[in-house]
Amino acid sequence: MSFDPTAVDTITVDSYGTLVDPHSVEATLEAHVDEIRPISTLWRSRSIMYTMVGNFVDDYQPFYEMNRDALRFALESHGVDLTSETIEEILSTYHDLDPFDDVRDGLETLTDAGYDVYVLSNGNPEMLESMVESAAIEDVIADTISAHEIRTFKPDADIYRHAAARTGTPIESIAHVAGPTFDVRGAMHAGMQGVWINRDNGPWDPSATEPDLTVETFFDLTDELAG
């Protein structure tokens, strides 16, 4: 399937790995652990796994709670024993992750082009509120939509359908932008157009249908929408 810019009325964007960089936690980890990148990577992958398993076994927890469990697992897997206070300090960095360089100005080009842009995230509302403030994007997004509203996580089709209802947009008229490939696949499965923002020139999942569109930045998406 190829991207159809004429069908797009509304844009939804993922948060972690799309607007802000989860690996920016490494600056805080550095003060407490030696194996920084392995712990950061395991923490991130484990938190994603917990959301997916939670969907299947009907065991919902807010993402912040799951993220704490994932951090504890990553630390214990590398033999790191930290106090609860230190773990909370590291976890709190999710309220202040670094935005990618193109985010602020790139989203502004989309809103200037007439598109309503919504954040659609697994993060719970408190996390999204702090992320929007920290990334300074309050004035270039229409709203945030949290998985907590329906207590299920991406890539469950229900969350994308919920986003369509919340934005008042037919699902086929939404383009969803995400860095994580599972999120793009989930959006496409639900009926949205899937836009993969691939900033590091990584490979697409070979087992999956190609995304409707691949871009490197939000500026590229604006260009594609302009035709």
Image (cartoon, rainbow, N blue to C red):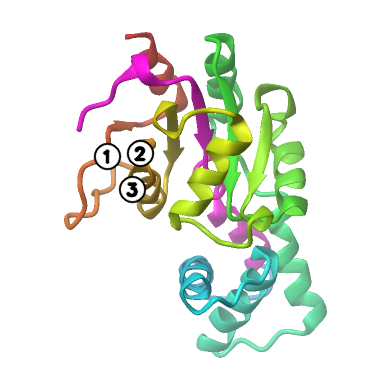
Answer yes or no: is residue 17 visible.
no
Cα separation between marks 3 and 1: 11 Å
Q: Amino acid at mark 1?
A: Pro
Element type at mark 2: strand
Question: Does 62 appear above or below 210?
Answer: below
CB atoms at circles 1 and 2 under 8 Å apart? yes
- Residue 84 rendering spot, x and y as whole percentages: 78, 82
- Residue 75 rendering spot, x and y as whole percentages: 58, 82
Q: Amino acid at mark 3?
A: His
| Residue at point 77%, 76% (across, down) | 86
- Residue 184 rendering spot, x and y as whole percentages: 37, 45
Disc 1 versus disc 2: nearer the observer: 1
In the rendered image, which residue does mark 1 sit on?
A: 211
Question: Does 34 appear above or below 113?
Answer: below
- Residue 88 rendering spot, x and y as whole percentages: 77, 72
Disc 3 versus disc 1: nearer the observer: 3
Question: Does 144 appear above or below 33?
Answer: above
Name which of mark 2 and mark 3 comes first in the sequence.
3
Residue 189's disc is 3
In the rendered image, which residue does mark 2 sit on?
A: 196
Q: Amino acid at mark 2?
A: Trp
Q: Quadrant of residue 199?
A: top left
Residue 120's disc is none
Cα separation between marks 2 and 3: 14 Å
Q: Residue furthest right?
A: 85
Element type at mark 1: loop
| Residue at point 61%, 86% (across, down) | 80
Q: Is residue 108 magenta?
A: no
Disc 2 versus disc 3: nearer the observer: 3
Q: Quadrant of residue 3?
A: top left
Name which of mark 3 and mark 1 comes first in the sequence.
3
Question: Which residues, given as a range, are shown in magenta?
Answer: 1-29
